[in-house]
Amino acid sequence: MFTSIVKYPVEKDNVASVYLLEKERELLRPMLASHRGHEIRAHNIGPQGVGLKGWLAGPSKSGSEEPRPFECLVEFANAFDATTCAIEIQRKMHEHNQRTTATKQIRLRIGLHAGSVEKRGGEVVGEGVSVASRIAFLASGNEILLSGDVWNQVKSKVSHPAMKLETPSLDGDLSRIGIFRLEPQSDRTHHNEREAKFDPRRLAVLPFANFSSDPNDEYFADGMTEELITSLSGLKELTVIARTSVKRYKDVTKSASEIGKELNAATLVEGSVRKAGNRVRVSVQLIDSRTEGHIWVQNYDRELNDIFTIQSELAERVSKELRIQLVESERKRLGRRPTESTEAYTLYLKGRHQLNKRTKEGLARALEYFKIALDTDPKFALPHVGISECHSVSDSYGYRNPPLAREEAKQAATRAVELDEGSGEAHLSLAWVLMDDWDWEGSEREFRHALELTPSDPMVHRMYAHWLVDQSREHEAMDELNRSLELDPNSPFVYLNIAEVLFLMSRYEEAITTYEKALEMESDHVPTLLSFVYALADRRMFSRAIEVRNRLLRLNFPEPRTNLFLAYVLAKQGMGDESRKLLTGVLERSASEFVPLEEIAAVYVALGNRDTAFEFLSKAIDMKSVGLTSLRYSARFESLRSDIRFDNLLRRMSLDRKRIDYPVE
């Protein structure tokens, strides 16, 4: 990455120059560090760069002007880190410029290129230096320009579009590699508010119909749908709509054009499965949703143990029809057989079918299927992924003791990665449990592996957004959530997470509207209701908060927690006696029923009992309670942040107070 300030006032106003330099470094350095950028001072850049002499240079003793101050080179481990850092830098610069006078505004141009960088003596040289600097000087202020190589590596991972520069000013070298301008993303929250391109490579795999004589074989048709989505999601040139958004079209009579418009998908895959004994018939058609014409139709009549070959051939044929050039790693991934045992695979599909229900009973049955699958084939990685996810969901939903559930989840995810290093699902499972274990560096590493292997998996983008929020990188988190929304437009989970980020950014009205949008999609979506009740109470919308709490009660959500929510609302209303009475009852039952300790602490905060609140938060940290990462930014704990004990809690979680606390009314 090469950065340069445009139109600095070196000769006219050296005081202004110093201000710009110091402000630039103040804004840039934390972002470079958070994206693992290695800063190379300008005076160390050699002749293949632009001959920089220092961070700030006025006229030399001879009276000649020193060339180009206010410039620096930064080295990153990969193109994604460099690009997301550049996006965050320009966003911060925009925010700074909005708050200051014209003379103190910083107009920064950024050039990105993936090339070699070498140190020779005291100089840094190489293609990476030369090309990045030349690209940067093509940019106007506040622009990011990327070489074609960088854009090809990141285009499936960032939500910003890019436009190729077609200009005579490009010399042969730059014209050959291609230069792209990263388009600024306006401060809009939802992808649905943007007009997306109707791209043939934006594809939805609709739920396969079960034509088997046995209705209990529904799991197999669902499994075929999900596995094809997973396979296609690993192809970087495709954007594949998630299972959670296409499942609503199961057994629904709608035209291809209607579905295409609703999902903004130009291409649809429809299919059916007929399973009989050891034979399987899979019928598939690729449809242009704009014309409802068939692009391709194929029937597969095979032995059941050929199911992986069918899946591989399907994915390759779809890519061929959409004129996608598969790289060798993608071709190999499509051709892999996750297990040699058809029985183990069938058991895995049954487990996945139960896991997707997200109920306590469904999770228990899923675990049984996954464990039997491993008895059949101990080297099959996907059942380990399923086991890890079962334990992680049980932890998040409070179905099991958190430390025990998390340890078992970690063991299963680690084993899955050991068995199949090329599985994006395995890396995501491990990232999830490492994040819950507060291993921030390890979880980021696994998230990046998962993003590389399955760039169209919305769950990866959504979970990585959680990590970014925990690291106080809310704007990047919103980018990831917008990408997740593109891939999963009908997911209440995505809208819930967007609402939570909006709330912590003090965009309260948008947050409330987005919570409501999530509940429009699924009125009984328990995770949304759990978060919404606190948001409403913190905005002093008490009657609505109690209404949401009562909805949870009607859904048979555990009574101790619903009573705890009511105790919190009453305490915020100033009804301390009523709140304490409910709290006492919850504490009596917490010895035998699971209640998140941070939720108990929140009630004590609302009652003004800081000491007891800190006691419960300390115990929650000992248990590594999954809800604790919101401690730094949740409005529930705002009044504790001035207490030195609060910083001690953050340190125990390997976090620090590097965010600016948002105001709470």
Image: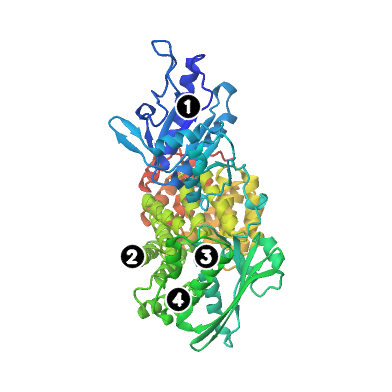
**Residue 358 visible here:** no
Pinpoint residue 628: horizontal percent, then vertical percent.
Answer: 44, 52
Could you tell me the amino acid type at mark 4? Tyr
Amino acid type for the residue under numbered disc 3: Leu
The nearer-to-camera label among 4 and 3 is 3
Could you say which disc has been placed on residue 23 in the image?
A: 1
Name the residue nearer the viewer: 605 or 64: 64
Q: CA distance from mark 4 to mark 3?
A: 20 Å
Q: Earlier in the sequence, mark 1 or mark 4?
A: 1
Secondary structure category for the residue under label 3 = helix
> In the structure shown, which secondary structural element does the residue marked by tag 4 occupy?
helix
Q: Quadrant of the N terminus?
A: top left
- Residue in the image at 52% along x and 59% along y: 456
- Quick check: 355 above or below 145? below
Residue that label 3 marks: 232
Question: Of circles 2 and 1, which is in front?
Answer: 2
In the image, residue 409 lies at what x, y percent? 39, 65
**Element type at marker 2?**
helix
Amino acid at the residue labelled 1: Lys
Residue at which label 2 appears? 418
* Res 257 label: none
Helix or strand or loop: what does disc 1 sit on?
A: helix
Residue at the outermost top position: 62
Q: Are marks 2 and 1 in contact (CB under 8 Å)?
A: no
Screen quadrant of the C terminus: top right
Among numbered discs 4 and 3, the one appearing first in the sequence = 3
Q: Amino acid at mark 2?
A: Glu
Q: Earlier in the sequence, mark 4 or mark 2?
A: 4
